[in-house]
């Protein structure tokens, strides 16, 4: 299988070339083809072959109108508040309009739903037929509902019907919607197969198939279901696949289901968005509740998702936060669809500003202007870290992601930092423990946390003590805390429950927050100063 990758240089060339001197004239660029440029007002037979960098204006941003989309679709885009396409939209929309199969590797928050929804809506309006012509498969009901809402928003002025099928909800309303007719079907694999088995869904007229969050569907074991569904669609179809990662299994799935696809990769799969400021706090497991409560009571936290590793942990933490006067909702796989949707609605509407969630909410949820993400537990899978923190810093907004790590999670932290290819800058608090990062695989020795990041080589006197990692430093740490007014010993100066959470300490050393931001806090190692108020652009 041959894949063509659109590079950033090609994107720049397309931007430059699409700006013709006479806007709206016959030479206005419609979209970039992998081999040529297609022009407005010209037929495919008269396409002009010309290299992109020859005497055309530079530095002009592409507009949605330059894709040649329907006027009603452009009106809906303007009403939604979109002004310019995101990089994944710039690179995907032309490919989809041309009719090519495509595999897109993009993180959440990059605008990938609009990247396929807009061209799909445009193509379906060109020739209307009273059958399901576009099918979007997605792994979770939350993501299915979100995509359905976006199709309705973008297609508000188009006479197209969109139906959403997902489990955990009553079948009657979904069956009724199908019988009224559907042009676009958004579905989870399980519910769709259920309806197909009862002859309630006919996929024989599907022209466009979209597999969204393909890697997530594979992780959840949906491959057999997806294969059965795809076999029920015509072989002559356009197939679009979107995935946050490009693992071996995803590529194998693409080999099976896509024909000579174009590959669009906007953000490297091991990178978080540069709008997200990442921080790390080393602590004991017992102190995590104190830390998260203090962090959440800060007025800088406008809205936050706190991720836990287990469903039980999510419920337990949510109850603890409520007991401390921090209103929160919990969302995970054991909740009914009604409970999950109610929790999401309360959180999105601002009735509560804290949502405690497992990884079921880490992918696909669109929560505007989320200021903070907290990892109460380090995720077991390194890739989940990228998807968790991708909930904030979306659509050009800035955000903060803070991870709490105890000694038992050092292995998981190492996996995360190996994926990131850099250490997460540490945030010092009064609860911080002097734990040591474990060495990266293939590197000798261990590494000390802090400003210098990773260091290879052996650790002095390593192995002489029978204590666990970091235990040799704890007595000195306790002494320092005692001098600062805390208690030493097993209690670690913990306040009584009736005293409420301790305020976060002022660690600015008398300087302003802006003065205290070192180069290291920008991603080159450790951290100095408070993490709040650091140019978040709010």
Image (spheres, grey):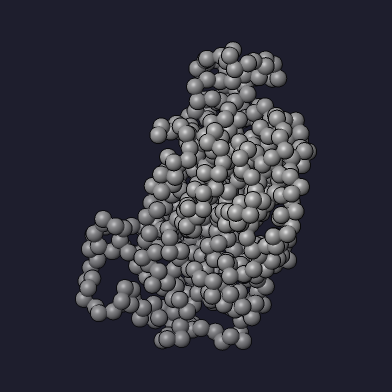
Residue 331: tell me if it is visible: yes
Pick the quarter of the image with the N terminus: top left
Judge by depth and name the residue closer to the eye, 56 or 228.
228
Identity of the residue drawn at 57% across and 77% down: 316
Res. 211 image quadrant = top right
Identity of the residue drawn at 70% across and 19% down: 24
Residue 119 % position (x, y): 64, 35
**How many numbered marks are there?**
0
- Asked if 364 appears above or below 263 in the picture, the reply is below
Residue 363 % position (x, y): 55, 55
Q: Is residue 192 left or right of residue 151?
A: left
Judge by depth and name the residue closer to the eye, 443 or 231.
231
Identity of the residue drawn at 21% across and 76% down: 464
Residue 121 % position (x, y): 68, 37
Residue 21: tell me if it is visible: no
Residue 432 % position (x, y): 45, 72
Identity of the residue drawn at 66% across and 41% down: 132
- Asked if 193 appears above or below 183 in the picture, the reply is below
- Asked if 481 appears above or below 530 in the picture, the reply is below
Judge by depth and name the residue closer to the eye, 196 or 516.
196
């Amino acid at each position: 299988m041959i894949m063509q990758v659109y590079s950033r240089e090609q994107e720049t060339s397309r931007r430059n070339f699409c700006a013709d001197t006479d806007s709206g004239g016959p030479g206005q660029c419609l979209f970039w083809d992998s081999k040529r440029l297609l022009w407005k007002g010209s037929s495919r037979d008269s396409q002009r072959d010309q290299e992109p960098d020859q005497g055309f204006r530079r530095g002009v941003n592409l507009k949605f109108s330059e894709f040649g989309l329907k006027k009603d679709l452009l009106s809906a885009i303007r009403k939604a508040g979109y002004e310019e396409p995101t990089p994944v939209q710039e690179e995907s929309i032309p490919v989809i309009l041309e009719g090519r199969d495509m595999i897109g590797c993009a993180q959440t928050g990059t605008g990938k739903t609009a990247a396929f929804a807009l061209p799909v809506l445009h193509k379906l309006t060109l020739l209307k037929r009273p059958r399901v012509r576009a099918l979007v498969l997605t792994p979770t009901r939350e993501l299915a509902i979100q995509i359905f809402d976006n199709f309705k928003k973008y297609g508000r002025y188009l006479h197209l019907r969109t139906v959403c099928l997902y489990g955990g909800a009553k079948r009657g309303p979904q069956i009724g919607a199908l019988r009224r007719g559907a042009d676009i079907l958004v579905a989870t694999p399980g519910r769709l197969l259920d309806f197909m088995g009862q002859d309630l869904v006919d996929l024989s007229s599907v022209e466009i198939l979209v597999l969204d969050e393909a890697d997530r569907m594979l992780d959840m074991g949906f491959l057999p279901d997806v294969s059965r569904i795809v076999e029920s669609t015509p072989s002559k179809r356009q197939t679009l696949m979107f995935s946050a990662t490009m693992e071996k299994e995803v590529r194998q799935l693409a080999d099976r289901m896509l024909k000579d696809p174009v590959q669009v990769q906007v953000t490297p799969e091991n990178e978080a968005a540069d709008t997200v400021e990442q921080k790390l706090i080393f602590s004991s497991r017992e102190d995590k509740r104190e830390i998260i409560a203090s962090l959440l009571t800060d007025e800088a936290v406008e809205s936050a998702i706190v991720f836990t590793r287990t469903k039980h942990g999510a419920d337990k933490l949510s109850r603890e936060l409520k007991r401390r006067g921090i209103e929160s909702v919990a969302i995970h796989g054991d909740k009914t669809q009604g409970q999950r949707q109610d929790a999401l609605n309360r959180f999105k509407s601002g009735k509560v500003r804290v949502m405690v969630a497992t990884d079921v909410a880490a992918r696909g949820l669109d929560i505007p202007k989320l200021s903070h993400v907290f990892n109460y537990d380090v995720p077991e899978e390194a890739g989940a870290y990228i998807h968790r923190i991708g909930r904030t810093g979306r659509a050009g907004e800035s955000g903060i992601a803070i991870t709490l790590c105890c000694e038992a999670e050092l292995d998981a932290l190492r996996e995360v930092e190996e994926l990131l290819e850099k250490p997460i800058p540490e945030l010092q608090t009064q609860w911080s423990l002097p734990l040591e990062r474990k060495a990266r695989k293939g590197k000798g020795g261990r590494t000390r946390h802090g400003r210098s990041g990773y260091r290879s080589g052996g650790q002095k006197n390593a192995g002489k003590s029978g204590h666990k990692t970091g235990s040799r430093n704890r007595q000195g740490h306790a002494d320092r805390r005692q001098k600062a007014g805390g208690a030493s010993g097993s209690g670690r100066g913990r306040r009584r429950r009736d005293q409420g959470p301790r305020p976060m300490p002022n660690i600015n050393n008398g300087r302003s927050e802006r003065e205290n931001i070192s180069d290291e806090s920008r991603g080159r190692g450790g951290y100095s100063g408070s993490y709040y108020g650091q140019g978040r652009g709010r």
